Amino acid sequence: MKRLDTRDAGFEAAFRALLDEARETTAKVDAAVAGIIADVRARGDAALLELTARFDRWTPASAAALRVTAAEMDVAVAAIPEERRAALELAAKRIEKFHRAQMPRDVELSEPGIVTGLRWGALDAVGLYVPGGKAAYPSSVLMNALPARVAGVSRIAMCVPTPDGVLNPLVLAAARLAGVTEVFRVGGAQAVAALAWGTDGIAPVDRIVGPGNAYVAEAKRQVFGRVGIDSIAGPSEVVVIADGSNDPRHVALDLLAQAEHDEAAQSILVTDDAGFADDVAAAVERALRTLPRAMIAGASWARHGALVVVRDWEEAAELTNRLAPEHLQIMVADPRALFGRIRHAGAAFLGRWCPEAIGDYVAGPNHVLPTGRTARFASGLSVFDFLKRTTWVEASEQGLGAIGPAAVTLAEAEGLDAHGLSVAVRLAHNP
Amino acid sequence: MKRLDTRDAGFEAAFRALLDEARETTAKVDAAVAGIIADVRARGDAALLELTARFDRWTPASAAALRVTAAEMDVAVAAIPEERRAALELAAKRIEKFHRAQMPRDVELSEPGIVTGLRWGALDAVGLYVPGGKAAYPSSVLMNALPARVAGVSRIAMCVPTPDGVLNPLVLAAARLAGVTEVFRVGGAQAVAALAWGTDGIAPVDRIVGPGNAYVAEAKRQVFGRVGIDSIAGPSEVVVIADGSNDPRHVALDLLAQAEHDEAAQSILVTDDAGFADDVAAAVERALRTLPRAMIAGASWARHGALVVVRDWEEAAELTNRLAPEHLQIMVADPRALFGRIRHAGAAFLGRWCPEAIGDYVAGPNHVLPTGRTARFASGLSVFDFLKRTTWVEASEQGLGAIGPAAVTLAEAEGLDAHGLSVAVRLAHNP
């Protein structure tokens, strides 16, 4: 863990090093992925069966066996303890409500002879990739599928690998709650290839979202253009801005909640109280003694963690804007005022009773967020990822008469004669 | 030019071939571009000066000379004929108005103890690439820069190559009208590298937009992640749905207005009147005899043009949705009704007096649109390309008490203990 103080002479250099810290390790899998995609394009379901046997260590009886049946869903969902089912339902309800509130309105501007408009429409079909095994998170199924359903997408096809044939019941329950229309036991680059190009058993989609390993990320990169994709998520990160009135243990657990995701995750405390920074550091060490995922969280904290002591909240806001963190907690006396100075953050959590983890599950906003300083220009997942716009113009002969001559002038200036003629030939009919 | 009829036995195969037609030619410039980017990162302005001398055949006196001064802008703008200046101003005014109407509202949802919200914010800085030489289109400067300005972007840096040192005055006038804050005489991959990584003379931006050649497109691909980019545009295309009551010459010029952009452009007529299709084909041939860009337009029409005869407008809508064209003209008796059946198109033009070319210049909606069937999931440029969202949650102790337990349950189900503890430790304080 690093310790920085804005009053130190070397602060700017140390902070820049923090900003430039490389946390991603990108495996070179381009060629392997290109081969898998070509195979699925050429041989369809037959390739899916072979690749599933090879990578997931189970052999589907036929292409039809790749699809999870409604009966299988029923059995899985019935096996879930009531408390978990209720928690999932609360989460789904809140996420759906928040995303419904985001839905945009169409635009229509009328003037004599010319109407212009912008119409929102949903994508026809979306593919949702869900990692298998230990990293199968039902909360991610809700966060990826519900915005699509709220946007009005009619087909939501989910692909999830089932290593050794084992399905995660909670993931299936989340899929059912979130309105997923099809579930396939296929993973890796082959799942992305099937969703993008289609096979006899899996119809192609228009956009693929959801997290995955290096193969999945590279496959999404390679099919981009054929279909839309979401951004490739990097390791998770949090900045906690906290004053000395907080309980150091609370803040320590907030930092460790990010750190436990991944050794490449990053947790940063920004405080105006050097003594509080010490207390938090000590509380982190104490918590690591008993935390089940202490190996991961400890490595993340040691390599990428930081305590930054600032003179005031103005400095805190400035540094946070440079970090543009995925998650931001603001635990000060007036969190809204400080939030007002933040320009770049994926999601913010205001107050002492608002740990980031409630945003991962039940608060309502999406937990798929921009990482690695991309909050400067990117946003979390939302209904906008599943909508697109068609703009339109309607003109009468009079309307064209009013604005057409300017179009002819500009077309001529740009040397595009047919453009100009297509307008001018109609103007000639004007009185 | 191909001719298809939905009543023919081979129609489906022929239409599929039309859908899959490869129109893009992608040059292999990855390595050259990677070298240029590395050079600009390592040597900054010195690299820009050398690369400009090599590729644009003029030698800037110093890094400062790369920047177009206010005085140079004045001289250029003063040289523009009054008619062109007025046309640019009309276009800018209408584009600005349409994009202002798109601006979204923030969201705030209050319930006891918990408030959730979504806040829109502008990007800090945007880079606008403008091609040089003959393809320097002032209309594209307006279309790219105005949405950024309307969104509230404070820094809009434009890079435009000036082959042999020559600046296009109309491009400068458009830049000034659109609120571009800085103009640099730099082009190619080196301009993209400078905008993404920054040099002493060019501060880095958060997102780069604007069209360019293969080098520029590849450079945008390579800096993606460091900064945001817009989508890489393919060749232009139009579908015109027209009944037999139209003037064939109008429709022929609409088809040729797309075709004259590029030999890879595609123009498709969809009509329910086979005789009208013949008339349009004849009118295209006649127009090609006198059109200045007949070499380009004729090649596009011969290779990629198509006449599709359908039984009715239901079929026309269905085929159009499969084509998901960048531009769509609807020239039938009730264009709004038919537009209501269209799910996938970048921009639509309704009625007999609404040639697509008015959308290229003065109608108001953006002319930067999704090509190559990507309108299934992508949209035209808009204020949304220059805005991002921060979601937020504010919770009181009571609010956390209401939703916290469900978060703990789900965190435990996912095996993320610190997540659960960060909530549970605060719940322990509840009465």
Image (cartoon, coloured by chain):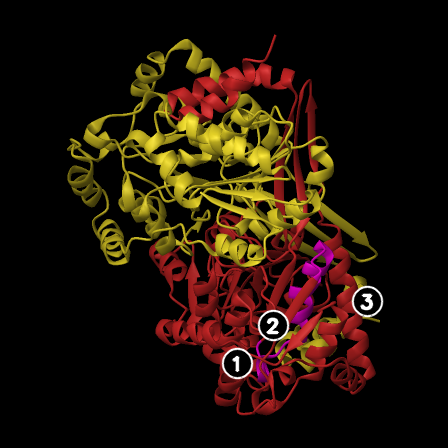
Chain colours: A red, B yellow
The residue pinned by badge 1 equals A48
The residue pinned by badge 3 equals B402
Closer-to-camera residue (B241/B219): B241
- The magenta-colored residue range is A131-154
- Find out whether the residues at labels 1 and 2 contact each other: C-beta distance under 8 Å: yes
Q: Where is residue B414 in the image (x, y as percent from the top left)?
A: 65, 80
Cα separation between marks 3 and 1: 45 Å
Q: In the figure, A410 relative to A389: above or below? A: above
In the image, taking residue A34 as reference, residue A70 lies left or right, namely: right
In the image, taking residue A409 as reference, residue A151 lies left or right, namely: right
Closer-to-camera residue (A212/A321): A212
The chain carrying label 2 is A
Identify the mark nearer the N-term, 1 or 2.
Answer: 1
Residue shown at 60%/78% (left/top)? A160
Q: Quadrant of residue B397?
A: bottom right
Secondary element at image label 1: helix
For the residues beneath circles 1 and 2, the answer to whether they share a chain is yes
